[in-house]
Image (tube, grey):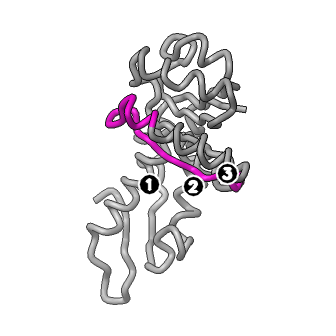
Amino acid sequence: MSIILYGPPGVGKTALAHLIAERSRARTVSLNAVTAGVADIRKVTQEAARERSEGDSRTVLFIDEIHRFTRVQQDALLPDVERGTITLIGASTQNPFFAIIPALSSRSQIFEFKPLTPENIRALILRALVDSERGLGHLQVNLTPEALDLIVAQSNGDARRALNARELGVLSTAPDSEGTIRYDLR
């Protein structure tokens, strides 16, 4: 089943799309609608058809910013979505009921993402501060409650904005004599 994920920036649409593609164990191809065209779509769908005929391999086509595709580009996807040659995962900041052609949106499950809550953002920041693998857990950071409150308030539900603010603040602050980075409002 093809899906379209839509909602504001920084709420996890692309992260979820990549997770779904990874878990599907299908060949995954990613395109960005800002830079891709009909020729790129045709190349992917032809490869997908060839691979499927040779060994029943499935292809997931992830298109970020799918709302930026023109009607002609969206129409180029339709036959291969209908035939099941590709499974489409589209991510959009625009409502697909207005930004995606009806024939394509009717063949997709549509999921709306909402802005993250302040509690979600707070938990994400705190988790990223202790995560040594994907965050800044390898550093000693003392994030003051006031600085955390400001990051949460300024993020407007956008995880990427919050994480970037946290990273900028931490990496642009020199550690003290004990190696601790004090992230505060000064």
- Check the image and report above or below for 103 versus 125: above
Whether pointer 3 and pointer 2 mark residues with C-beta atoms closer than 8 Å, the reply is no
Q: Residue at x 32, y 60 (%)?
A: 168
Disc 3 on helix, strand or loop?
Answer: helix
How far is the residue under mark 3 from the one under mark 2? 44 Å
Q: Residue at x 33, y 61 (%)?
A: 169
Per the image, the residue denoted by label 2 is 124
* Residue 149 image point, x, y percent: 47, 49
> Callout 1: few (<14), some (14-19), or many (20+) C-alpha neighbours within 10 Å?
many
Q: Nearer the viewer, mark 3 or mark 2?
A: 3
Provide the residue span drawn in magenta: 23-42
Q: Residue at x 49, y 36 (%)?
A: 63
* Residue 136 image point, x, y percent: 46, 71
Q: Residue 163: which numbered mark, if any?
A: 1
* Residue 170 image point, x, y percent: 35, 67
Per the image, the residue denoted by label 3 is 54
Task: In this rendered view, identify the residue nearer to me: 71 or 20.
Answer: 71
* Amino acid at pointer 2: Leu
Disc 2 on helix, strand or loop?
Answer: helix
* Amino acid at pointer 1: Leu
Whether pointer 2 and pointer 1 mark residues with C-beta atoms closer than 8 Å, the reply is yes
Q: Please indicate, yes or no, whether residue 118 appears anywhere in the rendered image.
A: no
Q: Nearer the viewer, mark 3 or mark 1?
A: 3
Q: Is residue 21 magenta?
A: no
Task: In this rendered view, identify the residue nearer to me: 153 or 160.
Answer: 160
Chain-order first, disc 2 or disc 1: 2
* Amino acid at pointer 3: Glu
